[in-house]
Amino acid sequence: MKCRCKSRFNAVFMKNLEWYLHNIYGNYKKSLFSKLGKKVLEIGAGTGTNLPYYRPDTDLTVIEPSKDMLEFFLKKTERYPLNIRVIEGFAEELPFEDNSFDSVVSTLVLCSVKSPYRALKEIRRVLKPDGVFVFIEHVKAPENTLTAKVQNALHKGWKWLFEGCDITRDTGKMIQSFFSDVHYKTVRFNSPFIPVNYHIIGYGIKKSC
Ligand SMILES: C[S@@+](CC[C@H](N)C(=O)[O-])C[C@H]1O[C@@H](n2cnc3c(N)ncnc32)[C@H](O)[C@@H]1O
């Protein structure tokens, strides 16, 4: 039987980090989530850190592969008056029809999916034309910065400990290759988590053909 120790560790770690995530991303999320439509898909919803930011009339579907994350997520849902559907699965293989959602949300997930290209292709597929993809992702630091050196030195161990989390991904570039109307800013947080200090925060629109 496969040991779930690392999965459990990551779920407990994210749960205990929630206060910090609200602190650093809270205002960005308030502004970004105001762009969401009624029918929303959140990929990699984790322990449910984003639940407080959805409008009460949101029709929310979440897809998340980790049973341990979902355990925390499900405990929290009662507190929020949203219509929530929870599915265990992967962003690279979304079990939904084309053009199903007004909006898709991803926060700190595209670093961890096995194939960000497949995940982005799927996100684009399930979004309705003119639908909005909202994201906050930590990214590869600019070349030759101290952070980039730290990322290069730590990336293998980090990936192992945090279940596939790749701190050297140029996620902004990838998003731009799937959405024609992408707006984001790069923000460097002064946090003790040096390898994940650089973030992209923004949204992309799926253009109608
Ligand atoms: C760092 S946590 C972020 C959780 C949450 N989005 C947040 O902002 O607090 C990364 C999440 O992505 C999930 N994840 C990993 N691989 C995934 C995949 N292929 N598809 C969807 N979610 C995935 C993990 O299980 C975990 O819940």
Image (spheres, rainbow, N blue to C red):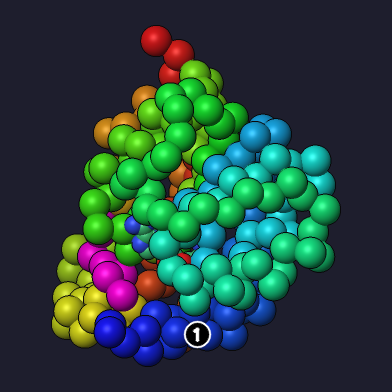
Instruction: Give percent across and percent down for residue 174.
Output: 27, 43
Give me the residue at 38% from left, 72% from top.
Answer: 196
- Locate the N terminus and report the quarter of the image it occupies: bottom left
Relative to residue 56, is residue 182 depicted above or below? above
Name the amino acid, label 1: Phe
Instruction: Give percent across and percent down for residue 179.
Output: 37, 30
Relative to residue 171, is residue 10 depicted above or below? below
Give me the residue at 45% from left, 28% from top.
Answer: 97
Q: Which residue appears farthest toward the front when viewing the image?
A: 1
Q: Does mark 1 have its CB less than 8 Å from ligand 1? A: no
In the rendered image, residue 165 lying in the magenta stretch gets the answer yes
Instruction: Give percent across and percent down for residue 117.
Output: 25, 43
- Locate the C terminus and report the quarter of the image it occupies: top left
Q: Which residue appears farthest toward the top when viewing the image?
A: 209
Q: Quick check: 48 left or right of 136?
A: right
Ligand 1 resides in the quarter of the picture at bottom left
Give me the residue at 72% from left, 63% from top.
Answer: 77
Instruction: Give percent across and percent down for residue 87.
Output: 52, 53
Give me the residue at 45% from left, 84% from top.
Answer: 8
Secondary structure beneath dot 1 equals helix
Relative to residue 142, is residue 87 depicted above or below? above
Provide the residue designation for mark 1.
13
Binning the other alpha carbons within 10 Å of mark 1 as few (below 14), some (14 to 19) or many (20 upward) gives: few
Magenta part of the chain = 163-170
Q: Quick check: 24 left or right of 69?
A: right
In the rendered image, residue 92 lying in the magenta stretch gets the answer no
Residue 185 in view, yes or no: yes
Choose between 107 and 15: the one closer to the eye.
15
Q: Main secondary structure of the magenta part?
A: loop
Residue 189 in view, yes or no: no
